[in-house]
Amino acid sequence: MNAWDEPSPKVKEYVEKEKLPFTILMDGRSLLRDTYNGKSIPHNFVIDKKGQIVFDEVGFSVSGMKNIEKLIQELLEE
């Protein structure tokens, strides 16, 4: 999720350039951040199809990203 007021075309250009395989949510008004109680940057959430948080981690780590990737694969297989 992009929690800043970064212009949409700039984000879209970056996503296409980097070939990111996921959706970037634009949240310049902090609606999602407030809904899911995000307090830090980076703050990683995985939200399932029912809108429930199934992963919540503050900060960045390579092992955390691997856990996120594994969890997303599992959720997609459901």
Image: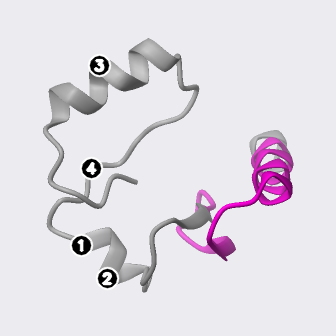
Q: Which mark lies nearer to you, 3 or 1? A: 3
Number of marks in the rendered image: 4
Q: Residue at x 78, y 45 (%)?
A: 69
Q: Quick one: SS at disc 3?
A: helix
Going from N to C along the chain, the mark reached first, 2 or 4, is 4
Residue wearing tag 1: 31
Q: Amino acid at mark 2?
A: Asp
Residue 31 or residue 75, whichever sits in front: 31
Which residue: 84% across, 48% down? 66
Q: Residue at x 41, y 25 (%)?
A: 15
Near mark 1 (Cα within 10 A), the count class, few <14, some 14-19 or many ≥20, is few
User: Which comes before the other along the chain, label 2 or label 3?
Assistant: 3
User: CB of mark 2 within 8 Å of CB of mark 1?
Assistant: yes
For the residues bearing labels 4 and 1, Cβ distance under 8 angstroms: no
Between 26 and 39, the one nearer to me in the picture: 39
Answer few, some or many: residues within 10 Å of disc 3's Cα (few below 14, many 20 plus, some between 14 and 19): few
Query: Residue 26's mark?
Result: 4
Colour logic: one colour
56 left or right, relative to 17: right
Q: Residues within 10 Å of mark 2 (few under 14, many from 20)?
A: few
Residue 29 lies within the magenta run: no
- Badge 3 is on which residue? 13
Q: Which residue is mark 2?
A: 34
As drawn, is 33 to the left or to the right of 36? left
Q: Which residues are magenta?
A: 47-73
Distance between the Cα atoms at labels 3 and 1? 23 Å
Q: Secondary structure at mark 4?
A: loop
Please check the rendered image and state whether residue 66 is part of the magenta-colored stretch, yes or no. yes
Disc 2 versus disc 3: distance between alpha carbons?
27 Å
Quadrant in the rendering for residue 61: bottom right
Per the image, label 2 sits on a secondary structure element best described as helix
Locate residue 55, reporting x and y percent: 70, 70
